[in-house]
């Protein structure tokens, strides 16, 4: 019979251990109130307790996918790593009492969770001269298990605002340590800071090319935070030099975990993750192509579709799997435990800006263009009941914009997935059904809110399209707008090209140039269009102005550090349009309204008759 003392000891141990399980946010990922989205921590704890003699030896464990950080607040930041006995993602689902555990289509069996807990400690160090000092300012302990694919996600608290820190994880009681990561907190909401810089990315398709763009930005080390607008992973199957793993379309939790794991093996992605705090949102491919509230282009929400014809998984189950893997593998906060799909949120970064992160894709979006219904979308694109965000997010969005103005923030930067501006794709007035052009009343309501409440200094960011588009934010047809001066607009849209997903194909010139020239000729508020280069852009935000610099990667066919500056834009505070002459009257590629395109890095190859990129130097290696 145990003595009273050892019983008390066990009780204290239990309290500590359960608390440490709780400190790993991924057990509640994204919500403990949904059986398939969170883990029953007391159950994991009881299983772990039974198997306490069967723990891993620290030497069996590795930090398999580097470290990352994200969602900076003024006193805290999210830290992430994975510590596991294997690189492979775990097959287990939550073995939650009273629910059916995950069924594996591969082995045709139900899978049991492996409950051996792994204990990690983490420390945050002050920076000294660009390096970690010995001074630990925040620390903690957390457990992980196979239930959450051995991921660790903790919140480091007690930090100072707008400050660079270093952090590291280690296996408890051992010298087995993770790489050292670097991160940065946000300014306090009323702080006055001189400048905040962002590097903005979207659409990194692993099989389509190397992530040179991530590596270049990381090595250049010229920004405070990363903003990722989604399509951070792709769900398709693809072969080749960088074949997708698993080699199939993604449906199960194991599929999505494996894909996230594969992307995090990329050295350039790892470097950018290790050195910067990320603020991420998802687009469609984190779940599946052209998603909306009830389905995807390749999966209808009908029994016929998923039971008889398809992969035998419902739209909801697939979404749950994708969402759970996303929360496990990304350094993102859980915004609202009662609203499992919510990742729309905002960051108050000093008096300088509010960064508003939307989900125009998965949260509550009305039907989108799915390949077979384009005629139908043409008929309904004007319908006032159509929404990209759902009522709850939409009213939050407008309130957030108003509050931002009321609190005196100089800029409102809206990180959204899809292109906002009106774009006529062809001379017949054709429009996309999959961006804001398919939801015209939602766009009108947004513009109306901005104009009616006299909210200025709005900067929309977008990804998704794999091309560069820079436009004044004008309400054409309702409000006067002068394209020569930019007067009448309420801000600017910067929509960036892809990290590696395919853009304009074929000979670079004149085909892609013609395409771009057609775009800017048809669309009066569009000032620059460019589709050849893969790349990213950087935003430098001060109280006086925003400077946007667009960079291109001349080739993603090999891993290289080449970079070409494509165009620079200025938005002066209070002007609400691109400063004239737009881009200083000069861009490197694409088509620029009222300006020249130099193409200094193109030459005609007389043997093939095709234009090709030349003359770039190695940079930032
Ligand atoms: C696991 O991943 C690491 C880092 O990518 C690699 O060095 C190691 O060889 C991998 N181990 C196995 C067994 O594949
Ligand atoms: C979804 O339904 C539409 C309309 O019935 C059909 O044309 C389309 O092929 C279906 N897609 C899939 C993937 O089953
Ligand atoms: C949106 O605004 C445009 C431009 O004023 C107008 O032509 C269109 O009718 C409006 N559509 C809806 C659905 O509100
Ligand atoms: C844009 O600005 C950067 C940094 O000042 C400069 O290196 C680059 O040449 C500029 N690019 C263009 C196209 O003007
Ligand atoms: C091509 O790009 C590089 C790198 O941005 C630049 O230094 C060079 O001057 C450009 N032009 C030519 C003709 O090489």
Image (cartoon, helix red, strand yellow):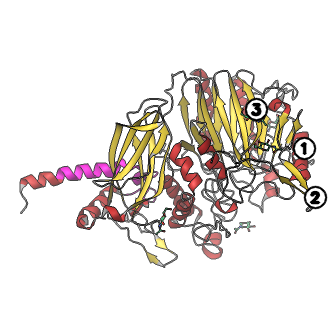
Residue placed under numbered mark 3 in the picture: 569
Q: Please state which of residues 588 and 244 is positioned toward the viewer in this rendering.
A: 588
Q: Quadrant of ligand 3?
A: top right
Q: Is residue 25 magenta?
A: yes
Secondary structure beneath dot 3 equals strand
Quote the CA–CA distance across marks 1 and 2.
24 Å
On residue 394, which mark appears? none
Mark 2 surroundings within 10 Å by alpha-carbon count, few (fewer than 14), some (14 through 19), many (20 or more): few
- Label 1: which secondary element: helix
Find the magenta span and give its range.
11-39
Residue 267 x/y as whole percent: 56, 55
> Taking 320 as reference, is 576 above or below it?
above
**Residue at 45% across / 38% down in the picture?**
131
> How many residues crowd around disc 1 within 10 Å: few (fewer than 14), some, or many (20 or more)?
some
Which secondary structure, mark 2? Answer: loop
12 to 443, vertically: above or below: below
Q: Earlier in the sequence, mark 1 or mark 2?
A: 1
Q: Which is nearer the N-term, disc 3 or disc 2?
A: 3
Q: Earlier in the sequence, mark 1 or mark 3?
A: 1
Nearer to us of marks 3 and 2 is: 2
Q: Which residue is mark 1?
A: 517
Q: CA distance from mark 3 to mark 2?
A: 34 Å
Residue 455 image offset from top left, x and y in percent: 68, 24
Query: 10 Å neighbourhood of mark 3: few (<14), some, or many (≥20)?
Result: many
Q: Nearer the viewer, residue 61 or 237?
A: 61
**Residue under the image location 82 percent in, 41 percent down:** 588
Circle on res. 606: 2
Cα separation between marks 1 and 3? 19 Å
């Amino acid at each position: 019979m145990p003595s009273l003392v050892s019983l008390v000891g066990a009780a204290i141990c239990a309290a500590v251990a359960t608390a440490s399980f709780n400190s790993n946010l991924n057990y509640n990922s994204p919500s403990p109130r949904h059986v398939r989205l969170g883990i029953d921590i007391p159950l994991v704890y009881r299983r772990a307790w039974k198997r306490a003699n069967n723990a891993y030896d620290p030497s069996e464990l590795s930090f398999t996918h580097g470290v990352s950080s994200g969602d900076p607040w003024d006193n805290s930041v999210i830290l992430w790593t994975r510590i596991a006995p294997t690189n492979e993602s775990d097959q287990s689902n939550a073995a939650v009492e009273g629910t059916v555990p995950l069924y594996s289509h591969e082995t045709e069996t139900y899978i049991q969770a492996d409950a051996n807990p792994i204990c990690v400690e983490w420390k945050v160090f002050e920076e000294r001269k660009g390096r970690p000092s010995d001074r630990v300012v925040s620390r903690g302990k957390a457990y992980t298990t196979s239930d959450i694919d051995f991921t660790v996600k903790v919140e480091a608290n007690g930090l100072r605002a707008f400050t660079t820190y270093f952090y590291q994880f280690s296996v408890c009681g051992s010298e087995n340590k993770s790489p050292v990561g670097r991160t940065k907190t946000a300014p306090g909401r009323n702080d006055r800071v001189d400048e905040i810089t962002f590097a903005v990315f979207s659409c990194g398709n692993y099989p389509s090319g190397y992530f040179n763009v991530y590596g270049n930005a990381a090595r250049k080390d010229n920004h405070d935070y990363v903003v990722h607008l989604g399509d951070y992973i792709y769900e398709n199957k693809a072969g080749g030099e960088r074949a997708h793993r698993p080699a199939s379309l993604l449906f199960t939790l194991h599929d999505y975990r494996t894909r996230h794991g594969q992307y995090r093996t990329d050295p350039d992605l790892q470097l950018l993750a290790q050195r910067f705090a990320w603020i991420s949102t998802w687009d469609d491919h984190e779940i599946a192509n052209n998603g909306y509230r009830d389905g995807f282009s390749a999966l209808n929400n009908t029994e016929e579709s998923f039971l008889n014809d398809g992969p035998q998984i419902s739209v909801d189950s697939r979404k749950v799997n994708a969402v759970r893997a996303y929360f496990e593998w990304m350094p993102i906060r859980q915004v609202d435990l009662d609203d499992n799909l919510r990742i729309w949120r905002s960051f108050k970064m000093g008096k300088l800006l509010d960064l508003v992160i939307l989900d125009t894709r998965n949260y509550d979006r009305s039907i989108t263009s799915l390949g077979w219904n384009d005629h139908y979308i043409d008929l309904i694109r004007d319908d006032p009941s159509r929404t990209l965000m759902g009522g709850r997010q939409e009213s939050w969005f407008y309130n957030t914009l108003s509050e931002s103005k009321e609190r005196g923030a100089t800029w409102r930067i809206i990180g959204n997935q899809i292109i906002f501006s009106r774009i006529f794709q062809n001379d017949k007035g054709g429009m996309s059904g999959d961006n804001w052009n398919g939801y015209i009343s939602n766009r009108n309501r947004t513009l109306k809110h901005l104009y009616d409440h006299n909210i200025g200094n709005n900067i929309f960011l977008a990804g998704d399209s794999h091309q560069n588009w820079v436009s004044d934010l004008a309400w054409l047809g309702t409000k006067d707008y002068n394209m020569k001066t930019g007067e009448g607009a309420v801000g600017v849209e910067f929509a960036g090209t892809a990290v590696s997903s395919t853009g304009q194909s074929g000979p670079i010139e004149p085909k892609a140039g013609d395409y771009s020239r057609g775009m800017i000729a048809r669309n009066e508020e569009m000032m620059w269009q460019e589709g050849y280069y893969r790349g990213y852009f950087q935003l430098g935000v001060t109280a006086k102005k925003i400077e946007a610099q667009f960079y291109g990667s001349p080739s993603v066919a090999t891993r290289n550090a080449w970079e070409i500056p494509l165009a620079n834009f200025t938005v002066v505070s209070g002007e609400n349009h691109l400063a004239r002459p737009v881009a200083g009257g000069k861009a490197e590629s694409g088509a620029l309204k009222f300006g020249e395109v130099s193409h200094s890095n193109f030459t005609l190859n007389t043997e093939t008759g095709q234009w090709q990129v030349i003359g770039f130097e190695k940079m930032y290696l």
